[in-house]
Image (cartoon, helix red, strand yellow):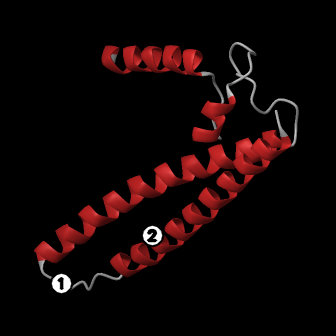
Amino acid sequence: MERSILKKIRENLEERRARLGQGLRRLDLEQSELDRVDSQAEMVDIAQSLEQLGRNSSIQEQELRELQAIDRAMAKLATVNYGVCEDCDEPIPEKRLLAVPEARLCARCQSIWEREASRVRTAS
C-alpha cells in the first residue's frame, strides 16, 4: 500500500480518535451532572435524568467500542497485517480502508459475518 494512503488513513484515525475522546469527556461531564439530581427533585425530573443516563451510557459504550477499533487499527498500521482481511487473508481494497480505516474484514467477509450475526440474533 502506498505511503501517502497509509498517511491519510493514520490521519483519519487520529482525527476520529480525538473527536471520540472529546465526546467521551463531554458525556462524563454530563453524567456527573445527572448523578447530582437533587433528592428533593420531582419524580418527572428524576425519570428524565434516568432516561438521559441510559442514553448516555449507550452512546458511551458505542464510542468506547469505536475507540477500541481505532486503537486496534492504529496498532496494525505499524505491521504488515494492516489491510489484510482477518478471515480470508486477502488484501482489503484501499477504497474500503479509506472509507472504513478500522475495517478488519473485506466487504465479502464482512457481509457474511453480518448475515451470520443477524441469523443468531433472530434465533435468540
Residue in the image at 32% along x and 58% along y: 54
* In this view, the mark in front (1 or 2): 2
Q: Which residue is mark 2?
A: 27
Disc nearer the start of the sequence (1/2) = 2
Mark 1 neighbour density, 10 Å: few (under 14) some (14–19) many (20 or more): few
Residue 72 found in image quarter: top right
Indicate left or right for 22 with 46 as reference: right
**Crowd band around label 2 with a 10 angstrom C-alpha radius: few (<14), some (14–19), many (20+):** some
**Residue 35 rendering spot, x and y as whole percentages:** 37, 76
Q: Amino acid at mark 1?
A: Ala
Residue at figure coordinates x 80%, y 39% from the top left? 76
Compared with 116, 16 (above or below) is below
124 horizontally vs 77: left or right: left
Residue displayed at 71% across by 22% down? 86
| Nearer to us in this view, 113 or 6 | 6
Per the image, label 1 sits on a secondary structure element best described as loop
Q: Nearer the viewer, residue 119 or 50?
A: 119
Answer yes or no: is residue 18 visible: yes
- Is label 2 in a helix, a strand or a loop? helix
How far separated are the C-alphas under marks 1 and 2?
Answer: 22 Å
Farthest residue to the right: give it.
79
In the image shown, does 80 or 37 lie closer to the viewer? 80
The residue wearing badge 1 is 41
Amino acid, disc 2: Leu
Q: Position of residue 98 (x, y in %)?
A: 64, 40
Asked if 51 appears above or below 108 in the picture, the reply is below
Q: Quadrant of residue 109?
A: top right
**Residue 85 image position (x, y, % from top left):** 70, 22
Q: Work out whether residue 100 can be spotted.
A: no
